[in-house]
Image: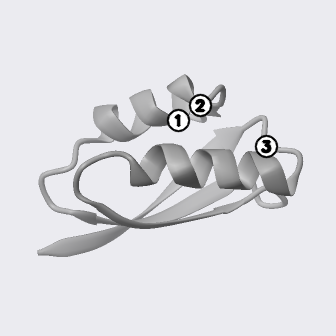
Amino acid sequence: MVQRRKIDITGMSCPGCERTVETALKSVDGVRRADANRESGTVEIVVEDDVSDDDLGDAIYSAGYEVVT
């Protein structure tokens, strides 16, 4: 089963930032789709049910950005 999630992120300022976040998230097993938007400061993802928020947060942090909690 898959689900949609929306995550608030700080630090994206250009199209390259969006691509970096999307690439980082797509490297996580179970992430099917990631669409980052620097203007809204969000990324919308489609993931398998077993993908944890920690795995997603770690990928975002490793890419140089932070999740807004």
Q: Is residue 49 left or right of residue 35?
A: left
Screen quadrant of the N terminus: bottom left
Instruction: Quote the CA–CA distance across marks 2 and 1.
Output: 5 Å
Q: Which residue is mark 2?
A: 63
Residue beneath the point at 52% across and 24% down: 62
Q: Amino acid at mark 2?
A: Ala
Q: Give the mark toward the camera: 2 or 3.
A: 2
Query: Mark 3 or mark 1, which has the lower sequence index?
Result: 3
| Left or right side of 45 for 52 | left
Identify whether 14 is placed above or below 32.
Answer: above
Give the x, y percent position of residue 4.
36, 71
In the rendered image, residue 24, in percent from the top left (x then y), is placed at: 50, 43
Give the x, y percent position of residue 34: 50, 64
Q: Which kind of residue does numbered mark 1 sit on?
A: Ile
- Residue 25 percent coordinates (x, y): 45, 48
Q: Nearer the viewer, mark 2 or mark 1?
A: 2
The kind of secondary structure element at disc 2 is loop
Q: Which residue is mark 3?
A: 12
The residue sitting at 65% across, 30% down in the picture is 65
Give the CA separation, mark 2 to mark 3. Answer: 11 Å
- In terms of image quadrants, where is residue 35? bottom right
Q: Residue at x 24, y 50 (%)?
A: 29
In this view, the residue in front, 56 or 22, is 22
Looking at the rendered structure, the kind of residue marked 3 is Met
Residue 16, relative to residue 45: is it above or below? above
Choose between 41 and 28: the one closer to the eye: 28
State which quadrant residue 66 falls in.
top right
How far apart are the alpha carbons under marks 3 and 1?
A: 11 Å
Dot 1 falls on a residue whose secondary structure is helix
For the residues labelled 2 and 1, say whether their Cβ atoms are less than 8 Å apart: yes
Return the disc, 2 or 3, that comes first in the chain's sequence: 3
